[in-house]
Image (cartoon, rainbow, N blue to C red):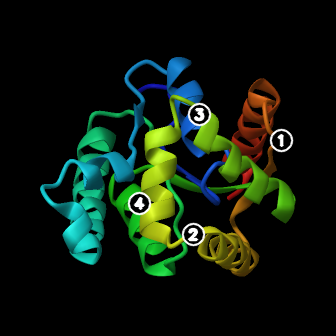
Amino acid sequence: MTDREPPRVVLLNGPPGIGKTTLARRYVLDRPLALALDIDTLRRGLGRWEEHQEAAGQLARALALAMIRTHLAAGHDVVVPQYVARTEFLDALAAAADAGGARFVEVYLTDAREAALERFAARAGDEAAAQHHAEAVRTLGGPAELAAMVDRIEAVRRRRPRGITVPTRAGAIEEAYRSLLAALEAASLRP
């Protein structure tokens, strides 16, 4: 028998540009064989996904759940950097974690509403994020829809009492990462 903690599925939820992918990448750097599972990358890997956005999104989520189950069976953490406003998918992630003997930790990355909108807009000038930003603007429908997304995720966060809130600030990656680790540690102490 080992003293090793069971693996966990960590959902990093929040609006576009809040730091989900950056923190997921940072998390797996410290954990050998942990998986940063980007559902948007899975979706973009599907042929002609933009013409079939709803079906592509459903298929990408199903693929992600299968990957999570496989990775948990190997005993490793999975961190999912994804905007999720549909509680059915939050429940599906929790069920996949439970089935794999893992702990599900729902983390909401936040910033002030205007700051979150500014962070998203700033991605347009970031070479590494420019393609993803342009795709998000195209598929979301522009700034008004992004503002609605920020409001929707905030409403979901308020309805999910077991969710953990981790404030983030633009450019403060290590600070956010330390806050995330502290939040995960506190979550591991909860029943």
Distance from Cα at disc 3 to Cα at disc 4: 26 Å
Mark found first going from the N terminus, 4 or 1: 4
> Which one is in front, 175 or 171?
171
Looking at the picture, which amino acid does disc 1 mark?
Answer: Arg
| Displayed quadrant of residue 123 | top right
Looking at the picture, which amino acid does disc 2 mark?
Answer: Gly
Distance from Cα at disc 2 to Cα at disc 3: 23 Å
Looking at the picture, which amino acid does disc 4 mark?
Answer: Asp
Residue denoted by label 1? 169
Q: Nearer the viewer, mark 2 or mark 4?
A: 2
Residue denoted by label 2? 142
> Which one is in front, 67 or 136?
136
| Displayed quadrant of residue 152 | bottom right
Q: Secondary structure at mark 1?
A: loop
Residue located 26% across and 60% down the image: 60
Q: Residues within 10 Å of mark 4 (few under 14, many from 20)?
A: some
Distance from Cα at disc 4 to Cα at disc 1: 32 Å
Quarter of the image with the C terminus is: bottom right
Q: Is residue 189 left or right of residue 99?
A: right
Mark found first going from the N terminus, 3 or 1: 3
Q: Secondary structure at mark 2?
A: loop
Residue located 69% across and 67% down the image: 162
Classify 131 as above or below 103: above
Mark found first going from the N terminus, 3 or 4: 3
* Residue 103 pos. (x, y %): 51, 52
Asked whether the beta carbons under mark 2 and mark 3 sit within 8 Å of each other, the answer is no
Residue denoted by label 4? 98
* Residue 68 pos. (x, y %): 32, 49
> Which one is in front, 70 or 190?
70
